[in-house]
Amino acid sequence: MLPSATMKDQAMRRPYDGLSPEVMIAAVEAAGYRCDGRELALNSYENRVYQIGIEEDVPVVVKFYRPGRWSDEQILEEHSFAWELGGQTLLRHEGFRYSIYQRRGGRWPDLENPDVRLWLGRFLGRIHRVGSARSFGARPLLTVDEFGWLARSYLLENDWLPGHILKPYESLSRDLLDRIDDVLGEVGELDLLRLHGDCHPGNILWTDGGPHFVDLDDTRMGPAIQDLWMLLSGDRREMEVQLTDVLSGYAEFHEFDFRELRLVEVLRTLRMMHYEAWIARRWADPAFPRAFPWFEENRHWEEHLLTLREQAALIDELPLQVD
């Protein structure tokens, strides 16, 4: 049984009330642009992102940050990192924090193409070379506590799990996270750097001129492999071929610690667990029930439990091998 409204994040209920088209346009004009009245909502759930038309010029893309998620210091660290890679800044209007970007076109990268994988590896190597130059002070680390234990606690303590899933999930998730803690201990201390943090293909715009990485909203400190494993798909051999190409390009710009290959399935598991809690925490935002209607179905939670069981086996397999 899903929780009632009283069990959800009341402080975050309808966080974008007041963000009308008039407010959005006024915010952009306050930054020195002359808008032509056109606005188009772009795909984003955590924040609100719009393309806004500009008189006698190309449109801009405006991101309005979710109230209460990040502090000003954390957002400015994101912007500082992005400035080193490209450039932007934090603005305010009518109580909303926002930033304005040049519009970039593009398509998903063709990850079946080895040349594309090599190019992405080179680009990520350059990003990580910049990311390793200094550390974040306000941005969080990628930790098992936040992505695993706290995500698990939120689902259990707020009655998000169907009754027949509750006990199996409670036991399996505990054992899984204990094993993840053990694996991290076996791998040992790793060098952490400033990451993109959410480097899936949907956040990469590909053009004939190469990749353009977007959405640094989840940037944080963590191991380099976090920005690499989401480019991999298919069976084990397919992923090994893909990773060989990516790392070949990556090594041209930044050194890679091959111990991190042990963490591919660990990080995949943590992302899965964090994703479920992320949707649950945002359920009071009307955009989420519309986007994820299957989240209320028993079948979804049954499939999630099955996936975690599969991950428990994968975590204990040998790391991927690269040529």
Image: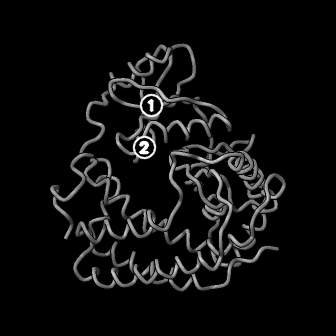
Residue at the disc numbered 2: 70
Q: Which badge, 2 or 1, is on the more N-terminal residue?
A: 2
Place of residue 219 in the rendered image (x, y in percent of width and height, measured from the top left): 55, 49
Give the amino acid type for the residue marked by disc 2 in the picture.
Trp
Residue at image point 45% right, 79% down:
308
Q: CA distance from mark 2 to mark 1?
A: 12 Å
Q: Which residue is mark 1?
A: 98
Q: Of the numbered discs in the image, which one, if any, rests on residue 46?
A: none
Q: Secondary structure at mark 1?
A: strand
Name which residue type carries label 1. Tyr
210 lies left or right of 222? right
Task: Count every numbered label the image shows and give the total.
Answer: 2
| 280, above or below 27, in the image | below
Which residue is rendered at x = 66% and y = 42% of the image? 212
Q: Residue at x 82, y 74 (%)?
A: 323
- Residue 56, given in percent of the width and then of the height, sits at 55, 13
Count residues near mark 1 (Cα–Cα under 10 Å), then give few for <14, some for 14-19, many for 20+: many
Question: Looking at the picture, does residue 150 appear above or below residue 23?
Answer: below
Q: Secondary structure at mark 2?
A: loop
Task: Please rate how many residues cluster around mark 2, counting C-alpha atoms within 10 Å: few if below 14, some from 14 to 19, many from 20.
Answer: some
Check if mark 2's residue and mark 1's residue have beta carbons within 8 Å.
Answer: no
Percent across and percent down for residue 115 are 79, 56
* 40 horizontally vs 15: left or right: right
